[in-house]
Amino acid sequence: MISSVPPRITVAIPTYNRAGLLRQTLQGLTRQNYPHDQFEILVIDNNSPDDTHAVVESFAGTRPAPRYLLETRQGLNHARNRAIAEARGAIVVFGDDDILMEPTWLAEITAPFAADTARRIGAIGGEVIPVFPDGLPPWVAEWHEPLAFRPDVGPISPRQSPMGANFALPKWVFDQVGPFHADLDRSGQSLFAGGDSEMIRRVRSAGLEVWFVPAAKVLHQMPASRTTFRYASRHAFDSARSRVMDRSAQPGALGYLLSRLVANVLKAAGFAAVALVNAVVLRTGEVKKATVRAWRSCGYIYEIMRSLFRKVGFR
């Protein structure tokens, strides 16, 4: 029988040096139509040098007032794990510090859990729609499509993984699969990724389903600093490295590493050639796209070589 009392929720917002955007996210959380005595807000400050603490304190009069936590171990997944340890809710909803949401967000993303008396669902994601308040350069547009897996509520395929900017897990899942992998995802200025997808893989390995709720959508703000060539290149390199780090810990890693090494050496050379040709004909946007793709392959090559050296005993 489904309880008429909605489950208690912990909303976890890890943050690093984005006080202005965080203020907008907290404003959205104060407008949620979920019963205010049934959810809490945790802001996990990962050593921000800006006025993040003051922004959180400015919401002290709201209900629920956000709880400020300082996590000194640098890294997004350290902040996520701190939230899990501190959470008082039965469900932990993770959001980025730069998202905007509708008042129905919390009710929508947690509704399947409330009906899941058999505990079959281990994670739920919502749609993530990138928005560009400072404009979107055409050359980078193809890398910023909305994340929408299906038009209705239900499970998604094993090849699909919700985005860490907008997903939720029941707290009991962490007792089964453990916390987030601290070596993956962002740390300070680095742009590592993969902690959310690695967690989703463990959830599925435990025999649990992963669902998608399109109505639980958020707008993911992408300022001008995140659409530059420098940012795109660094993100491509670091995210490629994080994929290798994740995959090298799984069975069959050696075959993966060797095959990806060959493939990415060829890709890096090919994309570099494409960039050179486009530079000759002055197609600046195509030069940037090809160079970013070449740099992603370089990230694979760099981390694969490090992984192979570790496997044969070199450090």
Image (spheres, helix red, strand yellow):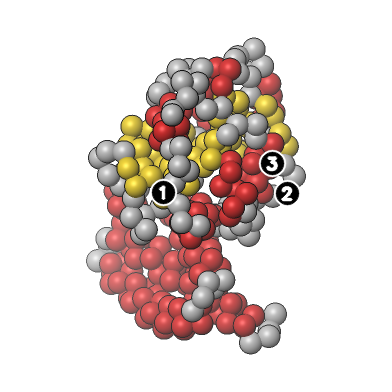
Q: Residues within 10 Å of mark 3 (few under 14, many from 20)?
A: few
Residue underneath mark 3: 85
Residue underneath mark 1: 210
Spot the residue most to the top: 61
Q: Residues within 10 Å of mark 2 (few under 14, many from 20)?
A: some
Q: Of the residues shown, which amino acid type is indicated by label 2?
A: Arg
Earlier-in-chain disc, 2 versus 1: 2
If the image is split into quadrants, where does the C terminus sit?
bottom right
Horizontal side of 46 relative to 289 (left or right) equals right
Can residue 264 be seen?
Answer: yes
Q: Of the residues shown, which amino acid type is indicated by label 3?
A: Ala
> What is the spatial separation of the Cα atoms under label 3 and label 2, in whole angstroms?
14 Å
Quarter residue 305 falls in = bottom right
Can residue 257 be seen?
Answer: no
> What is the spatial separation of the Cα atoms under label 2 and label 1, in whole angstroms?
29 Å
> What is the spatial separation of the Cα atoms under label 3 and label 1, in whole angstroms?
22 Å
The residue located at (65%, 31%) in the rendering is 88
Earlier-in-chain disc, 3 versus 1: 3
Earlier-in-chain disc, 3 versus 2: 2
Quarter residue 17 falls in = top right
Q: Secondary structure at mark 1?
A: strand
The residue located at (58%, 77%) in the rendering is 307
The residue located at (62%, 82%) in the rendering is 311
Residue underneath mark 2: 73
Spot the residue most to the bottom: 312
Numbered disc in front, either 3 or 2:
3
Q: Secondary structure at mark 3?
A: helix
Percent position (x, y) of residue 197?
48, 55
Percent position (x, y) of residue 304?
53, 77
Percent position (x, y) of residue 175?
62, 49
Numbered disc in front, either 2 or 1:
1
Give 244 or 249, whichever is nearer the viewer.
Answer: 249
